[in-house]
Image (cartoon, coloured by chain):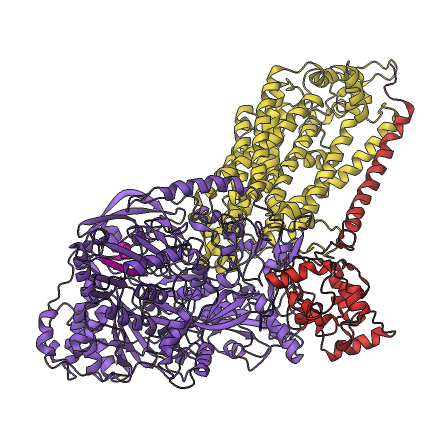
Chain colours: A red, B yellow, C purple
Amino acid sequence: MSQIFPKWADEAPKRILIGVIIFLNAAIFGVWYFFSPEFTDVGYAPEQPVPFSHQVHAGQLGMDCQYCHTQVTESRYANIPATQTCMNCHNQILTDSENLEPIRDSWETGEPIEWVRVHMLPDFAYFNHAAHVSVGVGCESCHGRIDRMEVVQQAEPLSMGWCLDCHREPEKHVRPVEEVTTMGYTEENQLEVGLDLVAKHNINAPTYCQSCHY
Amino acid sequence: MSKTYEYVPEPALVKGNHDFKSITALVTDINLRPTPKAWYIAFGFANILLFVLLFSIGYLIWEGTGIWGLNTPVGWGWAIINFVWWVGIGHAGTLISAILFLFRQNWRTAINRFAEAMTIFAVMCAGIFPAIHVGRIWVIYWVFPIPNQMSMWPNFNSPLLWDVFAVSTYFTVSLLFWYVGLVPDLATIRDRIKSKVGKVVYGIFSLGWRGSNRHWWNYEKSYMILAGLATPLVLSVHTIVSFDFATSVIPGWHTTIFPPYFVAGAVFSGFAMVLSLMIICRKVYKLEEIMTIDHIEKMNIILMITGTMVGFAYLMEFFIAWYSGVEYEKAIFILRATGPYAWAYWIMITCNVISPQFFWSKKLRRNVAFTFVISIVVNIGMWFERFVITVSSLSTDFLPGSWGYYSPTIWDVATYVGTFGLFFTFFLLFLRFLPMVAVAEIKGILPQADPHNYDEETGEYEPKKIQVPEPLRENV
Amino acid sequence: MSDQPKQTTYWKSLNELAQNKEYEKFVQREFPEDATELTDQVSRRSFLRVMGASIALAGFASCRKPVQKIMPYSRQPEDMVQGVPLFYATSMPFQDTVTGLVVENNDGRPTKLEGNNEHPSSGGGTNIYNQGAILNLYDPDRSHSPKRNGENVSLSDFISFSAEHFSNRDQRVLFISEATSSPTQNRLKQQALRTFTNAEWVTYEPFSENNAVEGTQLAFGQRLRTVNHYGQADVIVALDDDFVSPHRHQNSVENAYRVSANRKVTSVDDTMSRIYSIENNFTATGSYADHRLRLKTSEIEGFTYALASRLSESVNGLSAYNGIENEFSDHEWVNTLAEDLLSNRGSSVVSIGKEYKPAAQAAVAAINLALGNNGNTVTYHELPYRENRDENQAFSDAVREMQNGAVDTVVLIGTNPVFTAPADLNFAEALENTGTKVHLSDYFDETSRNCDWHVNHAHFLEMWGDGLSYTGQRSVIQPQILPLYDGLSEIEFINTIITGEESTGYDLVRETWQSYYPSDFDSQWERILHDGIEPDSGFGDVNVSLAADFDSAIQPELSYEPVSGIEITIKPDSTLFDGRFANNGWLQELPDPMTKISWDNVAMMSPKTAESLGINPERSFSSREVPVVRISGGNSTIEIAAWVLPGHADDSITLTTGYGRRNIGRIADGVGVDTYPLRTTSAMLYQPGEVSTTGQSYDIACVQDHHSLEGRDMIRSASLEGYKEHPDFATYKNVHGYEVPGMEEAREEGNEHGPISLFTETYGSYDDQPQWGMSIDLNSCFGCGVCTIACQAENNIPVIGKREVSRRRIMHWIRIDRYFEGDEDNPGAYHQPVPCMHCELAPCEQVCPVAATTHSEDGVNQMTYNRCIGTRYCQNNCPFKVRRFNFFNYSKEFVATGDDPEIIQMAMNPDVTVRFRGVIEKCTYCAQRLNRGKINAKIATGSRKPVDGAVQTACQQACPSNAITFGDITDQDSVISQDKRNERSYVLLEEMNVRPRTSYMAKIRNSNPELVSPPDLPSH
């Protein structure tokens, strides 16, 4: 009786099997790697109502982070400054730049400026700025070289795994408290210094669930 | 004193004087002849039930687990009961094909094919429940150890996790085992079917089987290996399912007897289900000569034994509860027999312990109608066993202040009934398109397959008259 | 930070629409149901469907994050640090008392109320009404604007109206106000009475102190407030005086912390007071008492006279009662009580429920006087704001005057007489015969609907005001937030009526208080605002002596006739009081302390009475249905579900008020049965009644289905003597007669911590972290349920509605198990709060497939909602069944659906995740507080361990009797460590070796050998 299938069909089952195995693994790896915040979130740089440049203020003018983010040492939140803070200077400087129009409006009307949030943690993750800043976790460590950003963008994945990297080995990241707001801080024998600081500040970065999720 | 023994020959496994050709025709014609109207009706009915299942699952995911009757003391209800019940049923197939195969029980060949089919579909039904009973099904993939940005792994201490592995492994191996067994028969149909499409489709699945010596050699080996693999799984899967309960701290769950007791129960219900289906099929498809009354009797004996084992387990539970001296254990077992769920408990005892005892009588063992009834009764009983274990322990556990009664809602029922839709949809497709008896294997046990039944010179087939050995005639 | 775009509701929306339509129709109809009709509240869940669009429900992170906006202030307010709560003192007015509170404000909105330690009425504790008040503030059903004949109008309309209408100073104006102690309101009252030449001012409370005050008038010829200092008494005889319950006693919180302090037993050398309770239905006090006698309400009076007469044989001053003979004259209790009282002269208290008639009150007053308790344990005070007359009488007269159409204008301030006034006064009709009717109230309620003008009332957290505590300390009420609906406070309202102009409460209150501080008012004022109270103020004691003609005057009053057949007693409801809290979801859902019923009121009766009515005294475990009875008294009849309450007096039926509200709000409407129709001026407390079964049945949502301990050892108790003989009676060994299995083996291995275990101990090391633990003293708990509400408020626990509760899905993180033990006609009741035990070897942690519940380094059993997939395996494997599952999207229905969600969302605690559907939740020991405490300690001192007392759980802080202690068990000096070392300390299911961090302290009853007392437990 006649052949139903061509010769090559003999190889087909084997090939298909191998193909499927490879594909599944590729898929899993792909999702794990490319759908992680490192790829989805890092670099998120939305346009802001006011083209505020950290590069100018923090970089060139060398203003300290805490000049504006005043409550970072006492609160969970590193507050976005009130319009007031902007006006401290901008009622003298660039009083007529139309970039600053929204600022002046807000100051007159009392209406808030609607800044777009860049660093978004899910609501079930409780991050406390004060707790970190007060033991020497630099702004830079999570927010990157803000002083070089024309437009603020997310520099780190802010994923749980990424948090744990530091919480498991704080000594690799902590710095002297007075250096917290320094940009581009480096320490050649970080490990040594780090260990001292961990001991000094009695740091034990918690890794149990309820330190962040409750 | 002296006694006269008489030699009783082993009854032939296949009745009627069939040869290879007639067997092939008898079985495969079912697949080749045009679809009977009755099949469509049955299939339509199954589909309606299947729709019920899909709808109730859809509604469940839409609304939330709250549509079921679950409450705070009783966190597991019908879903888990059905899961355990279906998995239990899913035991017979692989047991018959693998274990009986290893023990060279030739009578298995008549029933192993669709017992395995039943197993696979039953496990599919079972698999649905652990998945849908969770509160947030959209993140259920967290139970698989997949690398992720949370750097979180599942908790390997949890029996539920073991379940995931146990059941999926069991399913995969059973499926392969079944498929490997199917290959030669698929080839047979491929060769006999007329339609071009049929040829291609069966052709694809028969993997270019040509029945060459080499093929047979590979086939036998792989079949043997898979049988070896499947055998421990038969025992392991329900053992692990029983761990869901046995490893917990709840009185009535926290028992070391569970693994053997669950396996026995599983075999019990599995065989019952095979019987129910087989009795229908052999009638409808006129296969009485292959699935003979002797098969039914053998299976009834297994039912009787496993049923008694289960009964023994029930007794042991009570004994241990008393012997352990743990007041909560004692309380729960007394409550099972006398408390709010006594009705369920006594249904269970009647169906599982009492009913199989009828099979001590050879007459009833060989009574098809009676067997059918009992097989159904047993399956009901086994469902209630799971109900009693799951619900009664939870509803009245340690702190009397937290006790609460559980009763199902319409959605619990719909989901359960729906799974029969799934089961029968697949089973009917199987009956329609696949040979429900392992043709090749049956041929292997025909007298024609025995080389001694051929004349050395002529090669003519002449089955030997039974030579009754002389000495036995004497008085011993 | 707001979330946008608003991702509005999912599947709910369609339903909602339907729901809303339904609801619309429902409210269109003037009176949807007949007053006594029982409506099965299928889907009470719908009650909150009518709320809201969406908030970011943590737990369901949708795959694409919505764009979020941050809106900083334009001008930064001072001392406002975002994310750091602020605390201000204020007081909660309740009838004519106030309770001092401290309010937690998050981002400018009050989110939680705590007791004010400085304030005697609170002592740091609170009651369920205080805790519930926060939800009332954010109740979207509160009236949003003034109304003229039901039509919304602006506030200015009302002001111009009153300017015009009240310019006629000679019209007959009748003011009807709630009882209040506010000096400012009292000042304005006097002003009003001066301004309106022809005005009358009466106060009306459905459950007032009036009879108690009339009692002192009878006894001493002066109208005085009786203050019983239960905390200083060694023997307390409470004649149906439920003094620890807020619905029966205005000063319950102070009573609770003082009396429990006097009953704390830390060692065998301690003593405790002895409480006798005589009552018809089981009250919290009755369950707390050392001895309890059940009498019909109508017999209490007779019992009192019998007691007085017995005492009169031994002490002077009771001659009036000499020789009284009634069925109680030789009652063993009378003799025993008399002995005990006589041997504790000057240090005992006899008290009687404030609802009882003046003659009985007088008898009690006379007894206390005769026993020399006055000045020690009982003091009398003049109420500066109270008219010297029978207020109930005055009210009745006023209403009759209205009936006769003699009143031109009636001004109702806060009260709701159409609903609560005695039926025979027929207040609604009286209103019709009255010219102009003006009503100030929180809700557009039964009374408002019958008035020309309704003015929406400001919540006390929105207003300036003042008041006097029960013992007279001047307290200030300061607003925490601007009125959400621009409501008026009482004082602003009254002032507007007088002056016809708008005015701010602030000025009015200051004006009053200026008189107290002639010199440097402002600094004093600052201090008051800070403390919330003027400590050196208070009522002066009044020395009293029996009225000269007492003996003769009292004689006619002594005629006493108990109800022969079945009597019907009407009392305020334990959670809704007179109905003013009916639209509060937390309080509606809070189970009654004794019946454990939520969302309904029932007719409570004893098993015997039930049997005589043909009702099965045994409750079915498998069904929620209970029979409905028809109850008629006077000339009205109601139909209500019957409830068998062990320990209730026979031939007596207790009903509670406050249910069966109509068109108030989504929660109150149609829940339960209105019992006021049975209440008449002649029968304010009890009356004979007819009871019959109707053959119908009704679903009741009861959160506890089994009432017996089954001889188990969850609760351990002993008599004081027993305790002194065997101080360690509560240990496992003494309860069971053998050591905890595995303990000896463990000792051999040198492990004292607990029996040998398969598992490695999963909690952190003791040195570098605090190890949290909790201890609950059963000797202080009387089951009021304030811990439950406080927890609900602190942890954003949703209200789920009757249908879900009746399916046994209540979400409370700390439940209170109530057990009845002993003689089923007269059992002892035991309360046991059950939060998560935080087992060190937690069974739940072993079984979760995704590690969503694990152990923290500080020894807390953690539940990570956002990891949970909802297998409920942990819930099954929890021996204490404290884990709760979100079967539906409860939180969303509670806070995120309907018309104005922002309002109710403001009540949520920003520090706690709002749980999504399909996840398990449970007590976390208030993780947010633990973490805040640890972080603050770290920043402040660098230490990882907060000092003892720095961290309090919500339940602990709220408990008025300080039954709950919490803290770091690694700190050997901490209170918790001491409690855990105490010999009364025990843990549940010790033989399971789960090692709970929450332990209990065994109950002790100071029983009198002369009388039978509730059994010691466990009783095998």
Q: How many marks?
A: 0
Most extreme residue toward the bottom, as rendered? C519
Relative to C76, C483 lies left or right: left
Identify the residue shown where x is 71% and y is 33%: B97
Identify the residue shown where x is 35% and y is 81%: C515
**Picture layout, residue C643 above or below residue C516:** above
Relative depth, front residue between C994 and C951: C951
Relative depth, front residue between C598 and C292: C598
Look at the image and say whether residue B54 sits in the magenta stretch: no
Which quadrant of the structure image shows residue B101? top right
| Residue A126 % position (x, y) | 64, 63
| Residue B318 % position (x, y) | 50, 51
On the question of residue C467 being in view, the answer is: yes
Relative depth, front residue between B299 and C388: C388
Quadrant for the C terminus of chain A in the image? bottom right
Look at the image and say whether residue C412 sits in the magenta stretch: yes
Which quadrant of the structure image shows residue C84? bottom right
Quadrant for the N terminus of chain A in the image? top right
Which quadrant of the structure image shows residue A11? top right
**Picture layout, residue C39 above or below residue C383:** above
| Residue C762 % position (x, y) | 65, 66
Most extreme residue toward the front, as rendered? A96
Relative to B100, C471 lies left or right: left
On the question of residue C353 being in view, the answer is: no
Relative depth, front residue between C750 and C368: C368
Identify the residue shown where x is 75% and y is 78%: A199
**Picture layout, residue C847 above or below residue C111:** above
Q: What stretch of residues is rendered in magenta?
A: C409-422
| Residue B267 % position (x, y) | 62, 38
